[in-house]
Image: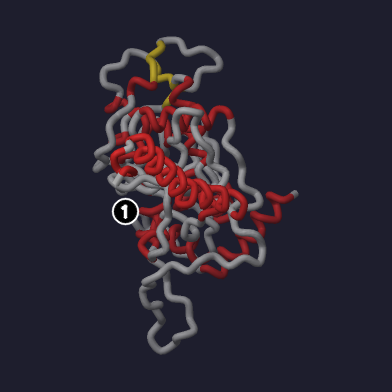
């Protein structure tokens, strides 16, 4: 009983017990993880601008609505090419000595997952318009407009980044919308979010609960025609819009487009795979097809959807002819 009546022995023992448990339960496992988990080969550290952008991402509460974790369920395939691994987060360190806001995996998806957004939506022009007013590019968006990250100038300087905001979303601004350094830092962070490919020979974890594979009636070995509308919605609609009319001053229309309806398939496929810079009339289009590793079947499905929608009446294409053009475009790009 003397032990329980002696506060020095009692609290000293409790402190030692607590410290011992902390070492065994928290510190030693953390050291073990650091020794056995390493970033994937080819993983790129954040640039100085991206690190500043990460701090802005945290300060503005973006982590409350966006996750950065691709779960191993089939429904998450739209967010990345594979489920997330421990190695994806191994190079992330404390923000500083006092703060451990490092791994922004998040817990809620009010907005889309951002694990691979640097590949899904790499275009700076789209990201800046979206940041200034999300409803300019996604009508149903509930994301707030971050207009305080921009300024208005009647005569932008030579090095200013002017944002092509559609007239209906200018909010009475008298002049040009110019991105501040903070906006550019935030975009640099978003563009850095890319899944690192696994080393050659490594197999990615399988997505669970896969839906049954569709087959062609009477020919189970044939590849079924892909849903061009769904592919367009996932990869193209954010800029060119559901109605195919684009956004005046920002992104070109596909409705009645001479590229979409023309006979120059090589140019058409090259734009899908490698992007196109139509400045100053429109923002630059990123290399969507290459970033998303489109196959000839996916490119053909998108082209056929664009050529037969919104009143367009273009000639349909086949995956075989698109495959030849993709190979030609790749060979020219390598020269």
Q: Which residue is labeled 1 in the image?
A: 311
Instruction: Say whether residue 272 is visible.
Output: no
Callout 1 secondary element: loop
Q: Point out the residue furthest to the front here.
A: 2
* Image coordinates for residue 147, horizontal then vertical, percent: 33, 23
Q: Is residue 193 left or right of residue 65?
A: right
Q: In the figure, 125 relative to 103: above or below?
A: above
User: Between 79 and 96, which is closer to the camera in this rendering?
Assistant: 96
Q: In the figure, 225 relative to 127: above or below?
A: below
Instruction: Say whether residue 158 is visible.
Output: yes
User: Between 15 and 308, which is closer to the camera in this rendering?
Assistant: 15
* Image coordinates for residue 302, horizontal then vertical, percent: 44, 58
Q: Label 1: few (<14), some or many (≥20) within 10 Å? A: few
Q: In the figure, 231 relative to 223: above or below?
A: above
Q: In the figure, 91 relative to 169: above or below?
A: below
* Image coordinates for residue 92, horizontal then vertical, percent: 53, 41
* Image coordinates for residue 13, horizontal then vertical, percent: 40, 43
The residue drawn where x is 53% and y is 38% is: 93
Colour basis? secondary structure
Q: Point out the residue furthest to the right here.
A: 335
The residue drawn where x is 36% and y is 45% is: 106
Q: Point out the residue furthest to the top here.
A: 155
User: Between 194 and 89, which is closer to the camera in this rendering?
Assistant: 89
User: Between 270 and 286, which is closer to the camera in this rendering?
Assistant: 286
């Amino acid at each position: 009983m003397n032990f329980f009546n002696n506060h020095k022995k009692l609290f000293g023992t409790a402190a030692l017990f607590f410290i011992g448990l902390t070492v065994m339960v928290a510190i030693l496992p953390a050291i073990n993880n650091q020794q056995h988990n390493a970033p994937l080969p080819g993983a790129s550290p954040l640039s100085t601008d991206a690190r500043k952008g990460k701090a802005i991402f945290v300060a503005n509460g973006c982590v409350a609505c966006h996750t950065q974790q691709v779960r191993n369920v089939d429904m998450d395939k739209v967010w990345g090419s594979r489920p997330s691994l421990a190695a994806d987060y191994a190079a992330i360190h404390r923000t500083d000595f006092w703060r451990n806001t490092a791994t922004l995996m998040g817990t809620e998806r009010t907005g889309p997952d951002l694990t691979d957004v640097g590949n899904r939506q790499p275009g700076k022009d789209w990201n800046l318009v979206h940041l200034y007013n999300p409803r300019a590019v996604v009508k149903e968006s509930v994301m707030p407009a971050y207009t305080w990250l921009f300024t208005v100038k009647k005569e932008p300087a030579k090095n200013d980044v002017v944002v092509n905001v559609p007239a209906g979303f200018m909010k009475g601004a008298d002049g040009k919308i110019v991105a501040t350094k903070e906006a550019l830092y935030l975009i640099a962070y978003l563009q850095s979010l890319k899944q690192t490919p696994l080393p050659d020979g490594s197999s990615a974890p399988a997505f669970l609960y896969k839906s049954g594979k569709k087959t062609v009636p009477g020919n189970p070995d044939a590849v079924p025609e892909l849903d061009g509308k769904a592919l367009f919605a996932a990869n193209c609609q954010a800029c060119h819009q559901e109605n195919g009319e684009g956004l005046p001053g920002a992104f070109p229309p596909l409705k009645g487009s001479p590229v979409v309806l023309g006979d120059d398939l090589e140019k058409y496929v090259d734009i899908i795979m490698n992007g196109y810079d139509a400045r100053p009339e429109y923002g630059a289009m990123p290399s969507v097809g290459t970033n998303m590793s489109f196959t000839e079947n996916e490119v053909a499905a998108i082209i056929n959807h664009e050529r037969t929608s919104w009143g367009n009446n273009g000639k349909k294409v086949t995956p075989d002819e698109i495959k030849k053009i993709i190979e030609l475009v790749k060979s020219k790009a390598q020269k």
